[in-house]
């Protein structure tokens, strides 16, 4: 068979980005070649997110755009994979009859076979969840960057009442530690300097006797690896062992994304978050004591059913007091199939928007103030490439801040350099090379 060209477009979280690499690696192993444009593709896959309705609407719109390529050439296969495929199953065809293939997050191993059967002009779908599937043996495609994602666990057992993830990604399961560490070593051999361990509740990782803290310590020993990050942890699994491993492992970067969602105990309880504000706040203190230069970020969800003005004010006040480096802030989007769905969406849209805008404004101010404090200091930056806008280079600080900088000498991706910060915004530090540390 001549080589078929694969185009894949990815929506949603980093987990999906990692899954798209996995899909590419798997299909490349079966003779497919990757293309960056849908124009010349034989197979078009859309890897989808179901977490909010808005994300889904974008995908429905995009699918109807992509269907144009099929009008021109009916041989082209258009597939929906990922969380929306799992969420909508064969109902995808009611809304998007031109789709040929519907494949959920646990069925990627069968993609070559499923694509083959579509080729014989039938539709195909596989949305079975498989609680044993970790894809530990499949090598993801490597995109040549100096940073890489490594999935260490899949699924989620938390069942927050607002969230669709446990239904579309199934039960929690961890990749064997040897497979994780082997993957990291392979990536390092190809030039990767920084890995980010991924999982929906990444610190719930456990395989046999190996805990998440053990895994961090083992990865910290890998020669040639410079930086380790992970996302997203759940507060209930943030044990003292994990905090100690973060503090003691020099390669584990001082940056943590610790979703809060709400600072009202009443709301947290209805969300089934399994912690109180006091417990969460204790973690923040422990973390900041153990890791004084820690950058802390979070997720906030406003407008959850039953969120009163005083609940919202508690969240506002906690953000103001805690001074996160950054936050992802969302307004509640009811998801059919979740437990909260039956509570409807009682808070009016304008009110949800008001609450969201208020915390965004607050957080922008705090982020700008925190970043302004970095002006005049020198930070270590892992160079990722040239700056997208304007001249100069781009990389991240240990705290995961975007840094753009100018350099009098040539620098190369993968290099760790010191950058003197001269200016800042809420989202970026700007500066100039202060002298490099050669690898
Ligand atoms: N509506 C809005 N935001 C949501 N999130 C998860 N489910 C929903 C929903 N139904 C947010 C949470 C989570 C982040 C990944 O997405 O804040 O931490
Ligand atoms: Fe979206 Fe959640 Fe699926 Fe990630 S896991 S793609 S955030 S629905």
Image (cartoon, rainbow, N blue to C red):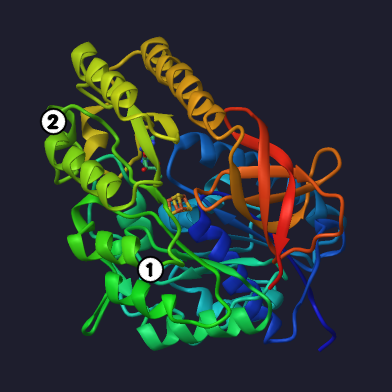
Q: Is residue 99 left or right of residue 315?
A: right
Residue 216: x %, y % from top left: 36, 72
Residue 265's disc is 2
Q: Residue at x 69, y 78 (%)?
A: 120
Tag 1: Cα neighbours inside 10 Å, few (<14), some, or many (≥20)?
A: some
Q: Which residue is mark 1?
A: 249
**Of residues 265 and 89, which is closer to you in this image?**
265
In the image, the residue with mark 1 has its CB under 8 Å from the nearest atom of ligand 1: no
Q: Assign a secondary structure to mark 1.
A: loop
Q: Assign a secondary structure to mark 2.
A: helix
Residue 128 in which image quadrant: bottom left
Discs 2/1, front: 1
Q: Residue at x 26, y 31 (%)?
A: 262
**In this view, 386 is above or below 181:** above
**In this view, 252 is above or below 287:** below
The Cα–Cα distance between marks 2 and 1, rounded to whole angstroms, is 33 Å
Residue 166 in which image quadrant: bottom left
Which part of the image, by quadrant, shows the N terminus? Answer: bottom right
Q: Residue at x 60, y 38 (%)?
A: 58
**Of residues 228 and 114, which is closer to you in this image?**
228
Residue 105: x %, y % from top left: 46, 66
Residue 304: x %, y % from top left: 28, 27
**Of residues 222 and 348, which is closer to you in this image?**
222
């Amino acid at each position: 068979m001549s080589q078929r060209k694969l185009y894949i477009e990815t929506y949603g979280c980093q987990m999906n980005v990692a899954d798209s690499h996995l899909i590419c690696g798997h299909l490349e192993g079966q003779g497919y070649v990757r293309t960056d444009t849908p124009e010349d593709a034989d197979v078009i896959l859309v890897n989808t997110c179901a977490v909010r309705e808005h994300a889904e609407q974008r995908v429905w719109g995009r699918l109807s755009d992509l269907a144009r390529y099929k009008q021109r050439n009916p041989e082209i296969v258009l597939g929906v994979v990922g969380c929306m495929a799992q969420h909508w199953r064969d109902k995808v065809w009611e809304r998007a009859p031109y789709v040929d293939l519907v494949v959920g997050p646990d069925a990627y191993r069968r993609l070559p076979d499923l694509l083959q059967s579509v080729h014989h002009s039938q539709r195909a779908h596989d949305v079975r969840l498989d609680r044993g599937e970790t894809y530990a043996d499949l090598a993801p495609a490597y995109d040549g960057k100096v940073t890489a994602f490594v999935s260490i666990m899949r699924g989620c057992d938390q069942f927050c009442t607002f969230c669709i993830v446990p239904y579309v990604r199934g039960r929690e399961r961890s990749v064997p530690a040897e497979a994780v560490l082997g993957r990291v070593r392979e990536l390092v051999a190809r030039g990767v300097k920084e890995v980010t361990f991924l999982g929906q509740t990444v610190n719930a990782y456990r395989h046999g006797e190996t805990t998440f803290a053990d895994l961090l310590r083992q990865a910290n020993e890998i020669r040639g690896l410079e930086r380790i990050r992970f996302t997203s942890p759940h507060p209930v699994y943030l044990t003292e062992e994990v905090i100690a491993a973060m503090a003691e492992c020099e390669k584990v970067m001082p940056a943590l994304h610790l979703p809060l969602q709400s600072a009202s105990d009443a709301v947290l309880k209805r969300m089934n978050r399994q912690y109180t504000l006091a417990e969460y706040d204790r973690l923040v203190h422990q973390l900041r004591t153990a890791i004084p230069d820690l950058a802390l970020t979070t997720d906030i969800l406003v407008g959850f059913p039953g969120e009163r003005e005083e609940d919202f004010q508690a969240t506002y006040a906690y953000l103001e007091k805690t001074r996160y480096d950054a936050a992802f802030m969302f307004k509640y989007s009811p998801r059919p199939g979740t437990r909260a769905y039956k509570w409807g969406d009682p808070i009016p849209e304008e009110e949800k928007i008001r609450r969201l805008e208020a915390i965004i404004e607050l957080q922008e101010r705090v982020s700008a103030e925190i970043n302004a404090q970095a002006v005049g200091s020198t930070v270590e930056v892992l160079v990722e490439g040239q700056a997208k806008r304007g001249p100069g280079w781009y990389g991240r600080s240990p705290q995961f801040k975007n840094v753009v900088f100018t350099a009098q000498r040539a620098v190369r991706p993968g290099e760790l350099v010191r950058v003197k910060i001269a200016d800042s915004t809420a989202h970026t530090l700007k500066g100039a090379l202060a002298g490099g540390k050669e690898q």
